[in-house]
Image (spheres, helix red, strand yellow):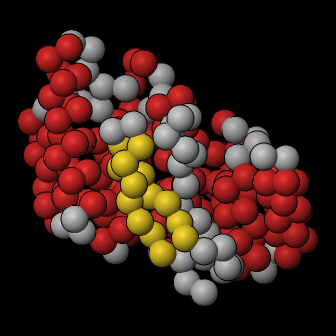
Amino acid sequence: MNRILTVLTVAGLSVLTVAGCARPEPAAKAQPSATAPRAEARTKATHAGPTSAEGAAELRSVFSEANEYVLDGQLKEAASVYEKAIDSGPKSFKLHYNLGNVYMQSGSVDKAITQYRKALAMNPEDADVYVNLGVAYFKEGRLEEAIDSYKRALALDKNDAVAHYNLGVAYEKAGRQSEADSEFATHQQLTRNQ
């Protein structure tokens, strides 16, 4: 069964979610429920974006407009909104992260990688970005880079079940079955405890 990537709006952010759970594809970082959005919780205020009320309102408007396009399946238009905001507005790692998510959903994996790297340059401590970067690398067949990305996510959050699962998938694809089995066991233990 192939995974279906969709974009949801969680606390004003477009985030990838995954339907289905069959291997060998790794999961993009699925966000938790709207009551506890991890991208928000992991973001340090110094990297979150504009500090003025006007800048924050402008950024919310960008996210809202782009999310409408995403929900309507108009990914080109959503990407355009994010690109214009990045070019002309306040700098925010969330803009790059969300643009990366839109590119991933539209199949522009190389562009997604570029945006995830830019997001990490602004906020290197967001595990979700590392997970999605790992998915992008995996899709490009860059297994060692995918493995490294998942390990970086786990260095930030050792209890990230999705990162453990994805690392297991990458290890399995790389022929490292014992390491894959260990990651899958950790994933099962973590999801059993949720």
65 vs 186: above or below:
above
Q: Is residue 62 visible?
A: yes
> From the viewer's perspective, is residue 180 above or below residue 58?
below
Q: Is residue 146 left or right of residue 165?
A: left
In the image, is 5 to the left or to the right of 192? left
**x then y, percent, for residue 96:** 31, 45
Q: 170 and 60: which one is in front?
A: 60
Tell which residue pokes out farthest to the bottom in this image: 1
| Picture coordinates of residue 165, whole percent (x, y) | 72, 62
State left or right for residue 49 relative to residue 17: left
Please state the total of marks drawn on the protein image: 0
Residue drawn at x 56%, y 34% as measured from the top left: 36
Above/below status of 76 relative to 79: below
Decide if residue 119 is in sight here.
no
Task: Tell me what residue is drawn at x 76 percent, y 67 percent.
Answer: 168
Front one among 174 and 85: 85
Q: Point out residue 122 in the picture as x, y percentages from the top left corner.
A: 39, 32
The quadrant holding residue 105 is bottom left
Q: Residue at x 71, y 71 (%)?
A: 169
The residue at the point 22 percent across, 42 percent down is 64
